[in-house]
Amino acid sequence: MRAGSQSNRTARQRLARKEAKEAFARDQRKRRLRDNAFAGAAGALVLALAVALQVFWFSSNPTADDLAALKQEAKAGQNASAIPDPSLAAGRTFTGTLVLNGADIGVELDGSAAPQAAAVFKSLADSSFFDGKDCHRLTTQDTMGVLQCGSLDGTGAGDPDYQWGPVENSPEDGTYPAGTIAVARGASPDSHGTQFFIAYKDSVITQETGGYTIMGKVTSGLEVLEAIAADGVADGGRDGRPSTPVTIDSFTLK
């Protein structure tokens, strides 16, 4: 009887230890699952906070690296190889003629002040890009008077595959004297394209988004622009399509 009791007791102890180990293992598995779930939620929260902080920080305190990244993103999908290198115009002055509705306007582009813009517009002029393009916008406001030209299709639309930057030679006080030739752009400093505008009178333009590149000036024929402006805007407003349709016959630079 004693030997059998000892054997039974040993078997019960073995079973108890086995059950205890299994219970402990189950508890550990539950704990790991709970911890992993918490860690995943915490990680997601940290990631979300990090993204939020990054967006906030970037929007309020952009660094040079941030701006460089934004510039790269803005150029994504465009044919960047088509943008002329600014070295092609640096230190050079290009002179030529812009012919509007058969009337000559003498122009000069300053590659020292705006090498990227001068390189782009010299290249476009050399390729006869502007020939036959319309000047789609006339502004006759009290403080601003400009004629804008060079749209891809004459409606004011740009070419999303031909965008470049940065803004060059922008006046700090926002003053664009009569005869100024400047580059039009979208909201981004790297959204220049093929459009330009000419101030036919002294103009003040807001500089809130970085201003506009002054790339040159009219050297003769400003009266051609003044006559177009005198005819006003097509719908009688102060900013829109000119009443007198304006077409670029040619734009030559040398």
Image (cartoon, helix red, strand yellow):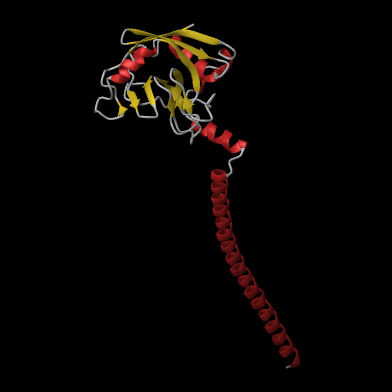
Q: Residue sitting at 36 percent across and 11 percent down?
A: 131
Q: Residue sitting at 72 percent across and 83 percent down?
A: 10
Q: Quadrant of residue 155?
A: top left
Give x and y (percent) for residue 98: 40, 10
From what the image shows, is residue 55 above or below residue 248? below
From what the image shows, is residue 178 above or below residue 27? above
**Front position in the image: 170 or 5:** 170
Asked whether the viewer can see residue 23, the reply is yes
Residue reaching furthest to the bottom: 1
Viewed as shown, does residue 254 lie left or right of 154?
Answer: right
Q: Quadrant of residue 235?
A: top left
The quadrant of the rendering that contains the N terminus is: bottom right
**Front position in the image: 197 or 159:** 197
Give x and y (percent) for residue 67: 57, 36
**Front position in the image: 136 or 206:** 206
Residue reaching furthest to the left: 235
From what the image shows, is residue 42 above or below residue 112? below
Give x and y (percent) for residue 111: 55, 15
Q: Residue sitting at 62 percent across and 75 percent down?
A: 23
Q: Residue sitting at 43 percent across and 23 percent down?
A: 202
Residue reaching furthest to the top: 254
Give x and y (percent) for residue 25: 64, 70
| Number of disc labels | 0
Asked whether the viewer can see residue 161, the reply is no
